[in-house]
Every structure is written in C-alpha cells, then in structure tokens.
Image (cartoon, grey):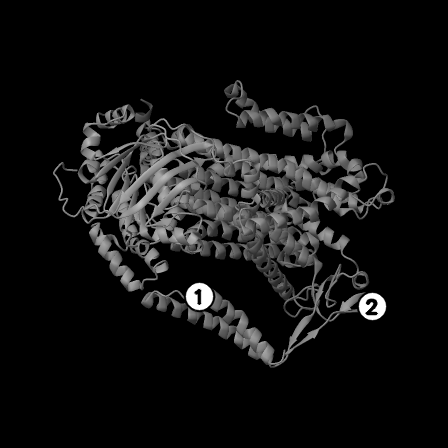
Amino acid sequence: MASMEQTAPQMDLLRLWRDKNARAVIIQILTIAGLFFFTFWIVSNAVTNLETIGKGYSFDFLFEPAGYDINQYLIEYTNRSSHLTAAVVGLLNTLLVAVTGIILATVVGFILGVLRLSKNLLMGKIVYTYIEVVRNVPVLLWILLVHGMLISSLPSPKASVSDGWDFLGVSFLSNRGFYLPQPNPEPAFWATVIAFFLGIAGAVVFRRHARKVQDATGKILPVFWVSVAAILGLPILVFLVTGLPIVWSFPELKGFNFVGGFAIKPEFMALTLALSLYTSSFIAENVRGGILAVSHGQTEAAHALGISNSRTLQLVVIPQALRVIIPPLTSQYLNLTKNSSLAIAVGYMDIVATIGGISLNQTGREMECMTIVLLVYLCFSLLISAFMNWYNKRIKLIER
Amino acid sequence: MTDVTEQNYPPGKHPSLPPPRNMTGWHVWIWKNFFGSITNTVLTFLSIFLIWQIVPGALDFLVFDSVVNAGSRAECREIADGACWAVIVERFEQSIFAFYPEEERWRVILAFILLFPTVGILLFDGFPARAKLMKFTIAYPFIAGWLIVGGWGLEPVSTDKFGGVMLTLIIGVTGITLSLPIGILLALGRISKLPAMRIVCVAFIEFIRGVPLITLLFVASTMLNYFLPPGVQFDLLLRVLIMVTLFASAYMAEVIRGGLQAIPKGQYEAADAMGLKYWQSMRLIILPQALKISIPGIVNTFIGLYKDTTLVIIIGLLDVLGIMKTALADPKWNGLPEEVYIYTAIFFFVSCFAMSRYSLYLEKKLHTGHKR
Amino acid sequence: MSEAAIDTSGMKVTDEVVIEIQHMHKWYGEFHVLKNVNLTVNRGERIVICGPSGSGKSTMIRCINRLEEHQQGHILVDGIELTNDLKNIDAIRREVGMVFQHFNLFPHLTVLENCTLAPIWVRQTPKKDAEEQAMHFLSKVKIPDQAHKYPGQLSGGQQQRVAIARSLCMNPRIMLFDEPTSALDPEMISEVLDTMIELAQEGMTMLCVTHEMGFARKVANRVIFMDGGEIIEQNEPEEFFTNPQSERTKLFLSQILNH
C-alpha cells in the first residue's frame, strides 16, 4: 500500500494532521503566517512606492502651519495655526454635530415612535409615510437637499431684514446663517448658574428623600413636579430677583452681513437637520418595536393588580421597553456619528474635511492623515460598543 | 349600556345577535379612530393641520405649477414658478447611462434585463427548473462584466465612461455578490473554535464597521495604489469596488453570524453524529439553513449598501446623484438643486421601498414557517 | 393529586352576594361571544367553570375585573357596578385578584419586587410591611427561599405560585383563575392545585376556569358548564358529574374524562 512506503517524516506529518488538536494548531499557525506575509508584502510595497516618489512616513507636518481657514471653530484657530490644531477643531466640529444630532434625533425619534403606535389612524399613517420616505432615501441626498433648500430658499442678510425673515425682530434667518441674540452674562449671572446646579442637586436629594418616605410610610410624593420646579423654577426665580443680569448682543445688519449676535452656520444647520431627520426615522422604528415587544399580558397583569395606566407605563412597560430599545439606539448613535463624515459634501469642516481633506491635499501626507482619521473613528466606535456591552450585561434579564 | 327586553331562550339555544347599534357602523369607526379621547382628537386636528400645510404646497410645486417642456431654467420660470422638470427630461438618459457610448448601450440594457431572472432564481423557491438554472446565476457576474466592460469581440469601454443608475447598480450588485462568500467565511471564522481565526475575523469586522464608508473610499482613492507592487495601478472604479466589497462583507458577516447562531445546537450535533467533516457539515447542513433565515438581513444590507453608493460622488465617481449634479453646473440649468435632488430621491425611494417590502414579506413568511 | 378527601371545615358559603352578573352580552366586532350570562356568586363560593375552548369562559371572568368590556347587561362586584368609570374599575381591581394562564410575572423585577409592586404603588404600604407581607404569602405558597431570584430562573409551577402570592399580597376578597395549570408540565400541576386548595380551605371566594375535574370534585361547591357563549348548566359537583342534564355537557364530560 502506498502509505506503507512513505518515509518516516511524512508519516509523522500525516499523523499530526489527523490529530484534532494538532490540526487546529497547524491551521492557526498557517493563518497567522499567511496574514503576516500579506501585511509584510503590502507594507514593503508601500515603502518602495513611497521611496520612489521621495516621501517618508512621519507626523512632523502636524506642527507646521495649516494655512487654510475654517469658518466654524470652538477653540482658537487662525490660518497660522498648525495642522494638529486644525485636526482638533475638526474633531470638535464632528463632536458638536454628533451630539446635537443625537439629541435632536432621539427626541424626534421617540415622539414619532410613540405617535406611530397611537390609535389615531390619520397620525399613524402620516408618521408611517414620513418614516418610510425618510429612511429609503440616502442620507447624503438628505444632506444635499436640506442644504440646497436652505441656501436657495433663505434670503440674503439684507433681504432677511426687509422681507421679514426675522423672529421678534431680534433673530434673523438668512443664507449666511441663523443669527440669534448672543447672551453676555454679567457677574451677577453666576447666581442663576449656581441656582441651576443647586436645583439639580435639590431634585436629586428630594428624589432620595421621597424614596425614603415611601419606603417608610408608603406615601408617594410628587417627585416629577418638584424636580421640574427645582431645576427650572429656582434658576428663573433667581434670574428675576437678581435683576435679569444678561446683556444681549443683538445681530445688526452692517453692509452685506450681520454683526454681533451669535450665528448658526447654514452648513451646520443643514448637516444637523439632515442627520437627525434621517436617524430619527430609524430610532422611531426601534422605539415602536421596543414598546410592542412588551407583551400585552404584562399590562394586563399590572391592570389586574389595580395599578393605574400611567403607573403601569412607568413601572412595567418603560423599564422593559428600554431594554429592547437601547442596544439598537446606541448603534444608531454610532451610525449618526459616522454619517457626520459626509459633512464634506456641504463644506462643513469636520475631522474628515480638515485633516483628511484640506490638510491631506496640501501636504500630500495621505498615509498619515488617513491613519489619524481612521483611528479617531475607531476610538468612537470602541467607546460606544464598550458602553453597549456594559449596558447589555447590566440589564440582561436573568434567566436560567 | 342599554337594557333590552330579554327574551327567554332555553339554555344553549340563544341565537347570535348582531351587536347593538352603538358599537358598529361607520360613525363608530370614525369615533374610535379619530375622536375617541382628548389626545386622539388633538392628534386628528394636528394631522389635518399638517396635511393642509404641506400637501397643497407640495402638489403645486411638484405637479400643478411644474414645467416639463422647456429649454432652460429661464424658460421654465417664464412659464410657471413650480418645479422645472425639463432639466430631468433633458438629462434622463444621461442619468441612467452617463457617458457610456450610445451605440453600445444595448449591452448595459441586456445585462440589466438578465439581472432579473438571476435574482428570481436566487430568491424564489418556486422558480421552474431552479436547480439547473443555478449555474446561470453563477455565470451571471462574468457575463454581465463582459457585456459592460467589453473585450473578447465587444468594443471595450473605459470605466471612466461609467456612471448614473448603471454605476449605482454595478457597485451595489458587485458589492453584494462578492461580499456574500467573504461574509460567510468571516462569519464562520468569528464563531470558530480556533482563537487565532476568531481574533483575526473579529478585528477585521470591527475595524470595518467602526469607520465610516467615506473614509474607506478616501483610502481607496488616495492611498490604495501605494500598497500594490510598484508599477501596478488599479483604476478608481476597481479600487472603489474592492473597498465597497470589504465594507459590505463585514456587515454581511454579522448578518450571517446571526443566522448561524439561530440554528439549533441539535443541527450541529446531528451533523457531527453523522460523521460529516467540518466543511461538509457546513456546506450540506448548516449554511443552507442559516443563509435562508439570513435573507431578510441580507436584503437589508443590500439596501444599506445601495444607498451608500451615493458616497462615491465625494471621491469623483458620477453615480445617479453625481451625474445629475453635473446638470447643476450647466449654466442653462444653474440653480435647480431641488428638482435634481427630488428626482434622485424618488429613484432611490422607489427601489429601496420595494426591496424593504420584499424583505418584510420574507420575514413574515419565515415567521409563519417556523411556527408550523 | 391524591384522591383523599380534604378538610372542608373552612369552606363556608355565606348569604352575602359578592358578584352579580345580569343579562350580560359581549361582542368582539360582529361576533357574539357572551350571550345573556346570568350569575350570582356568594361570599365563600368556589366555582369551577369548564367548557370547550372558545366557549367564552375566559372572556366571562375577564369581564369581572374589566380586562374586557361588556356591551349589555350589568356586572356588580361588591355592590359596585362596572362602567367606564376608571375609579370604580381601579377599586374593583384592588378587591379582585387574578391569576393568568401564562403567569405574566414581570421579568425585570425579582420575585419579591413582583409581590410588593402593587401594595407599594397602589395601597401605599411602607416597603418593610409590604415585604413582610410578601414573604408571608411566599411562605404560604412554599417558595420563600426564591424571593430574591428573577422569574426567569424559576420553573413554571414556581412561577405560577409566585403569581398567586403576588395577587394575594393585595388582600383580594375574590380570586379569579384563568386556566392556571394549562401552561404547566404535568408534574407541576399538583403543586399549583395544592396551593389553590389551601386557599379555598381558608374561605376565599374563587372563580376558576380549569379542566382539572379532580380539583372541581374536591373543592368546588358549584360547577358551571359553558358552551357557545352561554351558561348551559350549573350544579353541585357530585350532581354535575354523575347526572349531567344536557346532551352537550354529557358529550364534553365524556371527552375529557375518558381519554
């Protein structure tokens, strides 16, 4: 037989291949070796290619002046600032869009999700149409469409004043942006800020107190209304008592644009609106699914115990629905953050447009710039998925 | 609750009576659906207000005041101030074929028509002679590729002439077809018992899913050529196709992993008990079942990918959206972004909505199938 | 369940009427589910309701705590008429406990929290008292050691006993059971029935939809047979089983007793 005639070392290899554990090790070693050689191959290709055109791999360019302007910056930035500063400005702009978009999308998404379940046939159909139209059109198109509509339908600053695109005569909507009065706090405003934080602290303390009272005597205190009063009422009261310590700087038309006030740039507006519009339709579906996932038996059981409708929602339905809603919700947040990279399409200067766009083109450092951009997004994703794993573990229903 | 005079029937002989007037009929239906409670009434009025605010204006703009026949934007404005569809009419053919030579367009159309039986064979159980025709579905990508790119007897067409709906479909279909086998391998790797395999697959999947597609496209357009051996250059479309495929396969892997994990453990054990080897049991027992329950997810991934193809305009390829945007640069049509975007939006809405309905239908079908 | 007779000294039927249903009709859309149902229940009665599926038994007892609305006739519980008045509904639901076929325990709360939820939020009982009371009832259904587990960690029989304890924590005067053993494995049925027997022995007024005829013989003072949305016949268990009056009852009994 053929196998009998084979030489000894081959026999050993064959026997190893037959052994389950040894085979597992061999396959893994081969995989890693293959991967290693592939990496080596592309890296050496890159090194050769870069050498031929005389480029190295170094991040020194980050400290050279960027030489371009960014129209919205949250930290000090001029065109003499370094590429690194430009990258940070871009990163902050990304975060600004992401956070604003997430808040808007969540609020709108929850409202739509609940409305979609309402018994009202007309509202249900309207929301259904909205959701289907919005989510079946690419997000890039929404960004361009919203931007295009803002730019083409909004008047120039001059026309904004003369044609009545103002709100109460102090805010102006124009194609240069949404100009709002800017609040400049006087020293006494600190009292209001302190009152606000005291209000929050008070609400927390009251909540604990209410819990204790309820545990001890069974009495249920109106936690919600007291919290609202403490968090909103107290600062407003202090604000009034200290004599409205805010000086508003109102936008005024000087030449072709407004001076003073505080502007929301049309690019930012378009991007945020479009992203939250798009994401809210997905969130609405998650919310709807989460509420439907709480079985009818649960509400029935609570009702049979004499628990009222609103308490059933608070104690039985919402805690269970949130468990279903929050995991897909976090991935929607991640999607929104990733989609904010489309900022470049409307000229909003986010991380991709700054370091991955203009800096890259000016310095020709494709490798370095793209590495930075990819790492930034990877960090976002890892942070969000770490949160998600932690949350999922915490809320997992304990079963056998 | 009104009392009716009760007739006495002997036990078990009570006839089924129609419900009392006050609980059936159209007025009850309207009451229940529109005015049942205070919230309900408020919502009804809010809805009517919304419809009244939006629908007439939108209809005026889109239909009644719109212009279909005109030579330029200025002509449109002279006729009416609604939407100027003339730009779409003029650019319609270009929005589909872009700069593909006119005399060769039949090849694209043929490839497109052939797509239907291919998809049909793949997706519908009841397709006649399905098993035999499967070979055709495998050959389709090659046939279509040959038809569109040319060579071997056909006039070659350079890829920078590609664009419009055609490009959208090429990227979408290629991405999804190639990502399926890669996604299957990645999914198997991710749930494999071999730690090295698992780590490699998880790292790849999480990396791709963690970064936006646009950054990957930037990588494709700016630096992918650096990684190729000196002297080798891929053209932009090919590089984009590679990136889109990698991107889609990470998402595909997660969908298929879901399917694999939904297969009861007993199936794996039964396959082992029959003495099947790993690849045999996967190919014959596990994957056919897992893929079947993953189809709705795969369709959803496709919808996502299909919508994401619009991103290629940022790196300079001209898909539907891109080609229509060139119209905006034309001085004749300058300043009509809404018309162009709405046309593109309708194109995407119609195709994506149809696909999502299909995936919903599949989900329902699978659901009932499992119940039985 | 053993066939041994049980101590019936605590089961006393008084003259006080607690539930009165008069000429009650109910429709689901066009479908006439309950037809002219008349039923009077005195305090301390143990009523077993049986009948083929779809005969309206569950619907009838679900009308008693207004999980379902009736469209004609009157239902009075403890002298309070059930209408759309939410206050009355809540008042009645506090007096009437209900046990479901599928337990419907709250999966996100521990067994103890399941039991104290309603006393704390509805009766405004101090937490400590509510927990003591919950432990008392959990001991009664013989699972005090599971108090800090989650429903998902318990067997079906244990879950159903928690559900009974949860209802008892509201100190109801009437208990409704909607097929409490139908979703259970055979070996778990008796542990639930034993709990129910104990409850009956303490004089609880009970309405029970079930096919456990052994339970009916031992505990019930009245058996009701429903079919097609009507009460076809009702009698004392002995009479009902040995001498059924209507043909439909005979057929039904022969089907469930001789299988």
Chain identity of mark 1: A
Q: Dot 1 corresponds to which residue?
A: A222
Q: Badge 1: few (under 14), some or many (20 or more) residues near its Cα, within 10 Å?
A: few
Q: Where residue A225 appears, x then y in whole percent?
A: 48, 66
Secondary-structure class at tag 2: loop
Image vertical order of residue A95 relative to residue C100, above or below? below
Question: In this orientation, which residue lies closer to the viewer: A215 or B283?
Answer: A215
Chain identity of mark 2: A
Q: Where residue A331 appears, x then y in whole percent?
A: 51, 50
Q: Badge 2: few (under 14), some or many (20 or more) residues near its Cα, within 10 Å?
A: few
Q: Where residue A46 appears, x then y in whole percent?
A: 59, 49
Rendered image: mark on residue A255 = 2
Amino acid type for the residue under numbered disc 1: Pro
Position of B225 compared to A209: left or right?
Answer: right
Image vertical order of residue C4 relative to residue A307, above or below? above
Q: Identify the residue at horizontal 33%, vertical 43% (top origin).
A: C20
Secondary-structure class at tag 1: loop
Amino acid type for the residue under numbered disc 2: Gly
Q: Identify the residue at horizontal 46%, vertical 73% (top origin).
A: A202
The image quarter containing residue C239 is: top left
Residue A320 visible: yes
Q: Where residue B243 appears, x then y in whole percent?
A: 59, 43
Position of B211 compared to A246: left or right?
Answer: left
Q: Earlier in the sequence, mark 2 or mark 1?
A: 1
Q: Are marks 2 and 1 in contact (CB under 8 Å)?
A: no
- Find the distance from the CA under tag 2 to the CA under tag 1: 55 Å
Q: Look at the image and tell me in which quarter the N terminus of chain B lies.
A: top left
